[in-house]
Image (cartoon, rainbow, N blue to C red):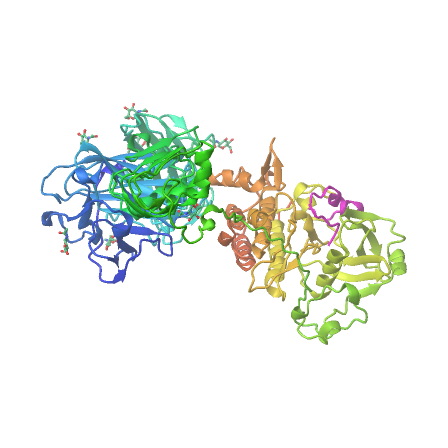
Amino acid sequence: MPRAMATSPWLLLLCVAAGVVLQARAQPDSKGFISIDCGLSGETGYVDDTTKLFFLPDKGFIDAGTNHNISAEYVTPTMGKSWYNLRSFAGAGAGTRNCYTLRSLVSGLKYIVRAKFKYGNYDGLDLLPVFDLYIGVNYWHPVNISGPSAAMFVEAIVVVPDDFVQVCLVDTGAGTPFISGLDLRPLKRTLYPEVTVAQGLTLMNRLNLGQTNESFIVRYPDDPHDRLWFPYVDTVTWAEISTPQKVETIDTDRYEAPSAVLRTAVMPRNVSGDIELTWPSEPTPMDPSPGYVIILHFAELEVLRRNALRELTIVLNDQPWYPFGIKPAYLYDIPAYKGSPFRYTQFNLSVKTTSNATLPPIINAAEIFTVFPTTNLGTNSQDVSAITAIKAKYHVSKNWMGDPCAPKAMVWDRLTCSYGAIGSRPRITSLNLSSSGLIGDISSSFVNLTAIQYLDLSNNNLIGSIPDALSQLPLLTVLDLSGNQLNGSIPSGLHKRIQDGSLDLRYGNNPNLCTDGNSCQPHAKKKSKLALYVVVPAVLLVVIVSVTILLICLLKQNKHGSMDNSIIPKNETIMSNSTVNNASSNSSLRRLESRRFTYKELEMITNNFQQVLGKGGFGYVYNGFLEDGTQVAVKLRSHSSNQGVKEFLAEAQILTRIHHMNLVSMIGYCKDGEYMALVYEYMSEGTLQEHIEGTNRNGACLPWTHRLRIALESAQGLEYLHKGCNPPLIHRDVKATNILLNARLEARIADFGLSKAFNSNDTHVSTNTLVGTPGYVDPEYQMTMQPTAKSDVYSFGVVLLELVTGKPAILRVPVPVNIIQWARQRLAQGNIEAVVDTRMHGHYDVNTVWKVANIALKCTAQSSVQRPNMTDVVAQLRECIELENGCSRDDANNGIYTGTRGNDPNMSYDSYTSDQSTNSEPFG
Ligand SMILES: *[C@@H]1O[C@H](CO)[C@@H](O)[C@H](O)[C@H]1NC(C)=O
Ligand SMILES: *[C@@H]1O[C@H](CO)[C@@H](O)[C@H](O)[C@H]1NC(C)=O
Ligand SMILES: *[C@@H]1O[C@H](CO)[C@@H](O)[C@H](O)[C@H]1NC(C)=O
Ligand SMILES: *[C@@H]1O[C@H](CO)[C@@H](O)[C@H](O)[C@H]1NC(C)=O
Ligand SMILES: *[C@@H]1O[C@H](CO)[C@@H](O)[C@H](O)[C@H]1NC(C)=O
Ligand SMILES: *[C@@H]1O[C@H](CO)[C@@H](O)[C@H](O)[C@H]1NC(C)=O
Ligand SMILES: *[C@@H]1O[C@H](CO)[C@@H](O)[C@H](O)[C@H]1NC(C)=O
């Protein structure tokens, strides 16, 4: 039923001739978009009225073909300007393959490539052509123009292996190829995981279901990737539903259907009926049984009454997709998809309601693609650059279009290539440009054809000297320069190659050349530079020695406290003057509370270090009681500690200066001779980790409301580090074991030993060691070695997932899998139940769980720019709590949680011993 987009007319062409004219450059715009109006004459482009996108003329993208205007009879008032003209490739001069080259791309990135066609009887012949399209060296799709007024497009999503991509039209002898427009849109790497270096997708249909206005095509800017979503509704059998609200995508990284599309949906008018989409397979000459990739989007648009249930299953040709039902989430998209493509001759797709459901099924959007292989590799890129430069320099006018060597059947004239093993790129092995009218000196680009064996430049008008660098071509066995106007002498390198018999150099018939038998004036000293290869390392590894910076988090209220002794002796100062606002405030910044203990006092407090609470990189943490009975935790630096004094002092420095109710607070410190210790408030409920694991004393499960609150409190602590401190701090080891809970289960962030100050102008700090804990480390930090505040956001996202799922950061099920991956997969299938901690026995509001899961996924986006900052996270978690409170759920106070861990403090810090931190610390 969905129309095959590749062969169906656009429903409406909204654009009218636009006004603004700007100077065009053959470059992607700031969004990375390239929009080409093929056949547009002149040098200037224009801004399209509807999309506000800038259309370029095609001059800088292709050097073949001719411009034409479509016949006046096919021009309609609503038609966009880009359809008025086209470029066609007629006649013998055009060659069978003609290519547009789109440059300045990012190698390895995914792109949408859209080629547009409207014949409009431009040539007055009324002959509808059929021809082939290639993306680079891979066959893409046939174009079969269905009528003179049809406006069609073929769209692909591909990984572009180089920093350019070519779109080629290939004449198959069934009419003259032409093209009206060409669009390129970059995609995030994480979108459409079906698209790989080896496989592309061709769009068959992209439906915005439930949109009743048949002229309403959603595209840029509603879809930031400028995909075109076509309205589709079968009003006889379907009812439309819609919402004015924003519909968000849960799985931000896979398909990202825009809200404008998700906001409408259809459901069967017959409450017990199904939603059916059927279409036949469309074989192509290259693939008689194409594989189909189908992506369906579901989002609940109505607030359901209590006890109402919408649950649906997807059945394709009588096979269910998933073993479970999908419950669309309110205002969140759940895309449904299958990993591998379907190969059927007919597709009967039904969306059915499950037996338990009380409401009919819905569907909001669908995308249908076929796959095509992109396994052919283009020629070695240095060869391509070199031969392209040679083509340009000598204005070679042969069939030199597209890739030089691939596909094999289209190799350039006068070129021979080697194809080597599968997975290796073709190389140019011979080039015969004899009698080709070459004028000028010998291009230095020949030296870059490093796999060449045979080079024939004879019988041209080449002048100047022979570059000795040619002797560096390791495989060159024949170099024919005869019949030119070269001068100078045979360079020494080439002489050697001739003498050792590895090169056959032919240089006869160059009257001005000095040869053995033809002595002449020595020219100015040979430019030995030409013979030298200067090797410049591609990457300079700069090891940046990290400088520890004094971390001052100014206390907003308490600036007048004083402390007599700095814990930092002058000679091991870790202060940097620039960060101290004013030297005299040095001591006045100390907090009153930070008491200095002697080692003797610590012995008393801990009853001779009797009871160990935990152990970490610094040494042991002991239980203790102050004179007034206050319970404390004492972290004593062990002499054998592998942790530097510096880190220990860094933590002390931070803790004396920062104060926030969601950061663990330091009561005092000890710097007594060689003894160093930190004294913290006692956090009786231990680590969040133990509560998630259920290894806390009573093994009770944290109710959802507590989890939410802990999430918010920890987020506030981190936000304070990032935003409230000056200079801001990056924690660098955020994890469930570093979130401690007091008797009231209030969360405090602990462990500042690894924290680093960063300059907000600078946004990152450079250090030379990766710190953090497996499962929590920001992949970007791992790559760049530069922690940012967003690295903490990433780790915090993992903690959120642990709170939702009750599972550790790395699951062993049975092979180790990262919780992000694990949750992302299940959430993407809309299966929140498969993710939520079952120990909560359903005592939670599904909407807030979705929301928290969504925040977690955003926090753990691969790329840091996509992650929210902690201020956003705090705001969103607050909303969750409000939502949860507003939910008047009877479950909230129905907690099965009894709270206290009792009087066995041994339990409190046990988990530190199994701490996997690469740089772990026992406490606080
Ligand atoms: C197409 O039409 C435009 C505007 O009417 C005109 O300037 C241009 O010369 C025409 N191009 C061709 C190839 O006829
Ligand atoms: C092009 O389409 C027409 C009509 O759909 C069909 O009859 C014809 O066989 C097609 N041509 C090719 C080469 O696929
Ligand atoms: C349908 O959509 C078109 C294009 O956006 C718009 O111009 C038109 O006003 C819409 N019609 C209705 C009835 O909303
Ligand atoms: C509604 O659908 C059910 C199940 O497909 C069918 O038995 C019934 O006849 C349909 N009712 C109407 C009014 O079409
Ligand atoms: C699809 O549905 C049609 C009509 O209901 C039926 O004839 C055909 O056999 C079905 N095809 C498959 C593959 O299920
Ligand atoms: C319907 O609900 C019952 C009871 O909750 C459950 O056991 C059963 O698995 C559900 N069936 C489906 C198809 O979800
Ligand atoms: C030769 O290749 C190198 C490395 O790819 C490139 O930097 C250089 O510009 C090329 N030289 C010429 C003359 O093409």
Look at the image and tell me in which quarter the C terminus lies. bottom right
* Pick the front one: 360 or 770: 770
What's the residue at 55%, 38% (across, down)? 822
Q: In this rendering, is residue 707 above or below 555?
A: above
Task: Left or right? Give the position of 834 relative to 902.
Answer: left
Measured as percent of width and height from the top left, residue 126 is found at 10, 39
Q: Which residue: 12% across, 43% down?
A: 121
Where is residue 497 drawn, in percent x and y? 45, 36
Ligand 5 sits in which quadrant? Answer: top left
The one nearer the camera, 163 or 298, is: 163
Please state the extent of the stretch shown in magenta in the rendering. 898-924
Which corner quadrant of the image does residue 338 belong to? top left
- Total number of numbered discs in the rendering: 0
Asked whether 906 falls inside the magenta stretch, the response is: yes
Task: Give the x, y percent position of residue 533.
Answer: 49, 46
Up the image or down, 594 lies above or below 71; here it is below
Residue 794 visible in the displayed image: yes
Q: Position of residue 223 (x, y in %)?
A: 36, 50
Q: Main secondary structure of the magenta part?
A: loop
